[in-house]
């Protein structure tokens, strides 16, 4: 993180030009003592001198002041992980205020604002009050809107649009979601299919393979991300529900999702169990919940993005992520939410007296 450091800028630029303190003082119209104090950090130039100094040194006022309202990717990553850990161990209000102060200080650092918004969404439930949760989601939504409108990074703006829509959905505004996506094309677009041949043509087959691995990885995870919603919509068609569940498991097995990305499998199993309860198939629901409990109490930690024996070329791609391979929430909070997703889930109330369910709940609580 960079702070104001006008002293260093004046010294460096003055020396680059081969000027003495007397030369600079004479140009600006101040005493040599004033220039000396500026360069030693004892005082700052009067605000009226800043444009003159910046013009003289052929630099912007921000450059002159040595201040950039930005954070590096590594700074953002460290801050996010720090805040995530704080949400798990400190007062919610204290960490929330820190998020707000950081966003205010770096209000034009759009990658940071995006991550602060994501942080608020991911931890909003910790506030403990439904009305307050909505308020925090609304606050996050405003950050995403700013990023979408002001960022010149097209991919970041697209991600911000998606998060804005998610916030609208969480706030119970489905029509707003539809309006946000009204102009977004739903046609299939896979740049990997173009990028890979381009790399091949310039004699870079490994880069071509890496691009395609990233594409396959993204599409597989996207499929497993939307299948739970489709399952939920199919509870009025038991046969379609069964078939969707079987096909999803085939994808899970084919791509080794249990080891590759267990957190997405956790969410899928939870939704699948809820659906089978709705269908009245409690035995199937309990089978899935036992698998769920086995998974979340197993050796899947620490949760992080990673490749495997098939996805061997993802490391460089992961390094470009704002959070690296870390999950968006602290592990303590993740474990807690996995337990509460079953133990305090009203969808499983009908299973409360089942001995199998009680054993599952006990196993999760002891995790």
Image (cartoon, rainbow, N blue to C red):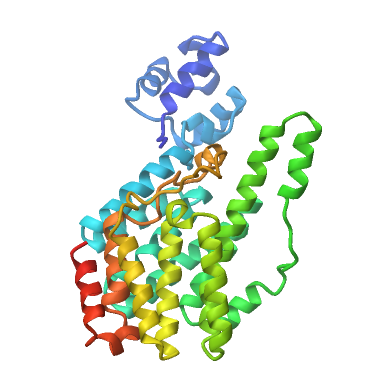
**Residue 182 pos. (x, y %):** 70, 75
- Locate residue 22 relative to residue 239 in the image: left or right: left
**Residue 267 pos. (x, y %):** 42, 68
Residue 123, image quadrant: bottom left
Residue at horizontal 48%, vertical 21%?
Answer: 10
Q: Is residue 283 above or below residue 51?
A: below
**Residue 167 pos. (x, y %):** 49, 71
Residue at horizontal 31%, vertical 55%?
Answer: 330
Residue 90, image quadrant: bottom left
Of the 4 image quadrants, the one containing the C terminus is: bottom left
- Asked if residue 164 shows in the view, the reply is no
Residue at horizontal 55%, vertical 84%?
Answer: 233
- Count the marks: how many? 0
Q: Nearer the viewer, residue 200 or 81?
A: 200
- Asked if residue 310 shows in the view, the reply is yes
Q: Is residue 221 above or below residue 311?
A: below
Residue 97, image quadrant: bottom left
């Amino acid at each position: 993180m960079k702070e104001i450091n006008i002293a260093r800028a004046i010294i460096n630029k003055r020396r680059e030009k081969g000027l003495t303190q007397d030369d600079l003082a004479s140009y600006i119209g101040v005493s040599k003592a004033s220039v000396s104090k500026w360069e030693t950090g004892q005082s700052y130039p009067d605000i009226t001198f800043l444009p003159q100094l910046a013009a003289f040194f052929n630099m912007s006022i921000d450059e002159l002041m040595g201040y950039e309202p930005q954070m590096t990717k590594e700074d953002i990553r460290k801050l996010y992980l720090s805040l995530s850990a704080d949400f798990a161990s400190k007062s919610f209000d204290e960490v929330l205020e820190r998020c707000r102060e950081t966003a205010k200080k770096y209000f034009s650092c759009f990658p940071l604002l995006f991550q602060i918004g994501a942080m608020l969404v991911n931890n909003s439930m910790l506030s403990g009050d439904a009305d307050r949760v909505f308020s925090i989601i609304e606050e996050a939504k405003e950050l995403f809107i700013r990023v979408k409108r002001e960022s010149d990074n097209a991919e970041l703006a697209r991600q911000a649009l998606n998060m804005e829509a998610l916030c609208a959905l969480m706030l119970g505004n489905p029509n707003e979601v539809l309006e946000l996506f009204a102009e977004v094309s739903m046609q299939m677009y896979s740049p990997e299919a173009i990028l890979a041949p381009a790399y091949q043509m310039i004699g870079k087959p490994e880069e071509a393979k890496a691009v395609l691995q990233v594409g396959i990885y993204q599409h597989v995870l996207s499929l497993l991300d939307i299948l739970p919603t489709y399952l939920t919509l199919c509870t009025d068609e038991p046969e379609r529900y069964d078939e969707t569940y079987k096909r999803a498991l085939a994808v899970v097995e084919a791509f080794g999702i249990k080891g590759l990305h267990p957190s997405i499998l956790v969410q899928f199993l939870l939704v699948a169990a809820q659906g089978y309860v709705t269908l009245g198939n409690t035995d199937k629901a309990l089978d899935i919940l036992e698998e769920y409990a086995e998974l979340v109490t197993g050796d899947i930690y620490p949760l992080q993005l990673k490749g495997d024996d098939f996805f061997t070329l993802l490391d460089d791609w992961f390094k470009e992520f704002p959070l690296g391979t870390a999950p968006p929430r602290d592990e303590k909070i993740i474990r807690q939410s996995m337990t509460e997703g079953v133990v305090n889930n009203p969808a499983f109330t009908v299973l409360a007296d089942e001995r199998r369910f009680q054993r599952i709940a006990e196993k999760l609580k002891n995790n």
